[in-house]
Image: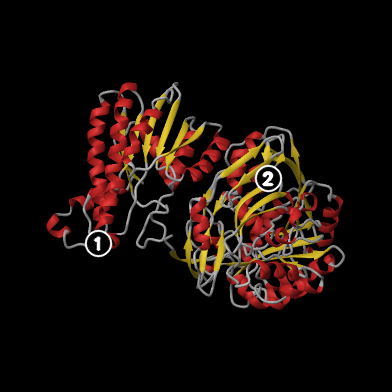
């Protein structure tokens, strides 16, 4: 991997994305921080440039503004070396709020699924043409089974898992690796203050795990690893029983 | 922003305060969270929670936790001035800047503390006599005042800067701190350790080596009689040598120790061993910066050795003139109580201070931990009485037990602080458990 590496971080304002961008730059890559709050991203970019000496740029990106995605991809075509993509945005409205306002279900799907597909599908030809790079897509353990407490968010992430699996199949033929990440509980703004969390991982831990696993070309990463076991159990429960549980 | 119902304590643990906290991750979120309406118990600011007592707690009220506002915003290698958000901690600054030959000029004994917290407590280090307090190196602060308006404050601004430096977060949310880093050429310090067999020998040794850049004494709080005040004086000078920077091994205290684990016998054995570690003739050796500045950080969660009930740290400073007699009185009360835990710290302080409520004054500062057990309040009261009689004061970053009246007698510049607070926050929006206990939002 002597060629210059660049990581495009989509949804770079989140705590995991910030930790990921820092870790990627610390390992020698340049970073492009994409998100809505570019003023705040500039602060993170300054931090990364000062602490690692790598180039850190910001770029305006809104997952919901799909009309803007094509021009964004055009601009990225100019990035030299290997372009890697970390898709880390998403929203997690509470299920009760969605039940009270079905429009929230649509916006949840739009940001977690449609927006993700929109940007990745436009990036795919670019990556294919370059015949190199890694795509990391953030799904969720919530996408492994429809649960009472979180099933719209879960459904959107489940859709993303399926999309990423297909994209892995497609891009893998052209030398581009796609990794699906399914994080368990991570200490972020998304989970801060939620009841019932356990074994919460730090954003820095998740970031390092992603980079390590991507270097090993892992296909699907549960992080922390034991979530693989937890979800294996949850997936194994027969629907007849599962439909009565409120986990 | 979503608020989390949390039960928090200071680093000394003990009874928890229930509060509603936000933990913004972006600048705009921080300003918005800071400006949200609050209840009767107001809002308190909290960093890494490394102050020992209740200055970053707010039972029944709100708290804004700054740890995720953690970006280094700018660095000028010419001037050494770095600009950071308040949640950046000393560990990160060490990791980023030491390899480039820059070190924070003043640091507390833990690198898990945030820079915002360092400003709010105007912290000092083992080099206070020469380097002064942290805020004396600050060149500029961005502050969001309690009314939501933004302000850039410099030391030349006078009152508002002096109220913010050491102001326990009560003047508002600091969003940017600019301060000057110090150039260092090597990987660490040359440390000289020598034994002092009693208090008089200790004070003499400290006076003799008063020119040393860094100076800190470890004192055996359990020693009594002819050994009263014995300990080890550690002085250090930055050295140009490359000292291996391999990361010190990190340990973690995995569980709360049971209450009986610390008793006069186990502590006596520990202190004796620690004292005898240094040969009678003394010794000199090179030590890496991290190990020298932050020895306790190699043991994560060390506060758990005190069990669930936690501990109280007493830290006072007494003037040089009255100091020797006051220290003797303090140590006699302490050793007679059979409550002192491990090593205590004895250091000289200089005059450097930047705020109305800054702790330092020229003299001796003594710090000890006591397990929080019944009777600790009486002991603390006796120690504060001796301190007050000697013209000294206790350190608010450590304090959990002082009363409002004694506080006012120890901090004569409180009136100045009070006046600033009244002008920027008439409705007492900024609060904390400490602010209520010491009646910081009431008339001087």
Q: Name the residue at 65% across, 34% down.
A: B100
Which of the two residues, B397 or A51, is positioned nearer the viewer here?
Answer: A51
The image shows a total of numbered marks equal to 2
Q: Quadrant of the N terminus of chain B?
A: bottom left
> Dot 1: what SS?
helix
Please state if B343 lies on the left or on the right of B66 as rendered. right
Q: Position of residue B417 (x, y in %)?
A: 71, 67
Please state if A241 lies on the left or on the right of B161 as rendered. left
Q: Quadrant location of residue B306?
A: bottom right
Does residue B244 appear anywhere in the picture? Answer: no
Residue farthest to the front, as pictured: A67
Please state if B159 lies on the left or on the right of B265 as rendered. right
Give the class, few, some or many, for how many residues have Cα within 10 Å of label 2's Cα (few <14, many ≥20): many
Residue B104 is marked as 2
Please state if B147 lies on the left or on the right of A200 as rendered. right
Q: Quadrant location of residue B248?
A: top right
Note whether A100 is above or below B87 in the view shown: below
Q: Chain of mark 1?
A: A
Q: Position of residue B219 (x, y in %)?
A: 73, 59
> Dot 2: what SS?
loop
Q: Which residue is mark 1?
A: A99
Q: Position of residue B31 (x, y in %)?
A: 53, 57
């Amino acid at each position: 991997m002597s060629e210059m590496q660049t990581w495009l971080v989509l949804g770079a304002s989140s705590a995991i994305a910030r930790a990921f961008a820092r870790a990627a730059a610390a390992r020698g890559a340049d970073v492009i921080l994409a998100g809505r709050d570019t003023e705040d991203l500039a602060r993170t970019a300054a931090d990364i440039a000062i602490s690692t000496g790598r180039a850190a740029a910001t770029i305006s990106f809104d997952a919901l503004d799909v009309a803007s995605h094509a021009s964004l991809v055009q601009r990225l075509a100019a990035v030299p070396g290997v372009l890697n993509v970390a898709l880390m945005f998403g929203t997690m409205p509470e299920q009760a709020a969605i039940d009270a306002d079905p429009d929230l279900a649509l916006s949840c799907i739009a940001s977690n699924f449609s927006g993700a597909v929109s940007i990745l599908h436009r990036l795919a030809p670019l990556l294919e043409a370059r015949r190199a790079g890694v795509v990391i897509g953030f799904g969720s353990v919530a996408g492994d089974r429809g649960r009472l407490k979180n099933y719209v968010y879960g459904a959107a992430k489940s859709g993303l898992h399926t999309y990423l699996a297909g994209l892995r199949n497609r891009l893998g033929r052209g030398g581009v690796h796609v990794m699906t990440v399914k994080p368990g509980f991570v200490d972020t703004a998304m989970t801060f203050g939620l009841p019932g969390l356990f074994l919460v991982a730090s954003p820095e831990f998740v970031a390092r795990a992603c980079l390590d696993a991507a270097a090993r070309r892992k296909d699907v990463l549960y992080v922390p690893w034991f979530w693989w076991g937890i979800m294996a159990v949850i997936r194994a429960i027969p629907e007849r029983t599962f439909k009565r549980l409120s986990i | 922003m979503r608020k989390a119902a949390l039960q928090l304590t200071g680093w000394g643990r003990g009874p928890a305060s229930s509060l509603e906290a936000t933990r913004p991750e972006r600048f705009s979120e921080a300003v918005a969270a800071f400006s949200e309406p609050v209840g009767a118990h107001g809002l308190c600011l909290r960093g890494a929670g490394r102050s020992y007592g209740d200055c970053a707690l707010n039972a029944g009220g709100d708290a804004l936790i700054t740890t995720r506002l953690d970006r280094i915003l700018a660095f000028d290698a010419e001037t050494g001035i770095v600009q950071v958000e308040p949640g950046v901690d000393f560990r990160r600054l060490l990791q980023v800047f030491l390899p480039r030959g820059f070190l924070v000029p003043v640091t507390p004994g833990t690198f898990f503390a945030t820079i915002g917290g360092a400003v709010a407590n105007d912290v000092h280090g083992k080099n206070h006599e020469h380097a002064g307090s942290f805020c004396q190196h600050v060149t500029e602060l961005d502050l969001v005042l309690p009314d939501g308006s933004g302000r850039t404050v410099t030391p030349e601004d006078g009152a508002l800067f002096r109220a913010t430096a050491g102001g326990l977060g009560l003047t508002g949310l600091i969003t940017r701190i600019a301060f000057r880093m110090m150039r260092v050429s090597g990987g660490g310090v040359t440390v000289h350790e020598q034994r002092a067999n009693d208090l008089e020998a200790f004070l003499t040794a400290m006076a003799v080596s008063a020119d040393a850049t860094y100076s800190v004494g470890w004192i055996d709080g359990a020693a009594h009689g002819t050994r009263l005040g014995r300990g080890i004086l550690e002085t250090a000078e930055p050295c140009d040598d490359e000292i291996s920077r391999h990361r010190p091994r990190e340990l973690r205290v995995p569980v709360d120790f049971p209450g009986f684990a610390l008793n006069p016998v186990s502590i006596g054995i520990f202190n004796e061993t620690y004292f005898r570690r240094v040969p009678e003739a003394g010794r000199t050796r090179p030590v890496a910066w991290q190990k020298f500045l932050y020895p306790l950080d190699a043991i994560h969660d060390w506060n758990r050795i005190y069990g669930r009930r936690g501990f109280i740290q007493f830290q006072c400073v007494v003037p040089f003139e009255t100091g020797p007699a006051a220290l003797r009185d303090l140590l006699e009360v302490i050793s007679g109580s059979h409550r002192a835990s491990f090593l205590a710290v004895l250091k000289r302080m200089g005059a450097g201070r930047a705020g109305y409520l800054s702790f330092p004054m020229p003299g001796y500062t003594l710090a000890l931990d006591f397990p929080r057990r019944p009777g600790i309040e009486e002991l603390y009261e006796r120690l504060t009485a001796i301190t007050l009689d000697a013209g000294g004061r206790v350190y608010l970053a450590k304090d959990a037990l002082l009363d409002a009246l004694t506080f006012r007698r120890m901090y004569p510049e409180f009136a100045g602080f009070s006046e600033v607070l009244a002008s920027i926050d008439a409705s007492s929006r900024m609060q904390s458990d400490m602010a209520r206990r010491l009646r910081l939002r009431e008339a001087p």
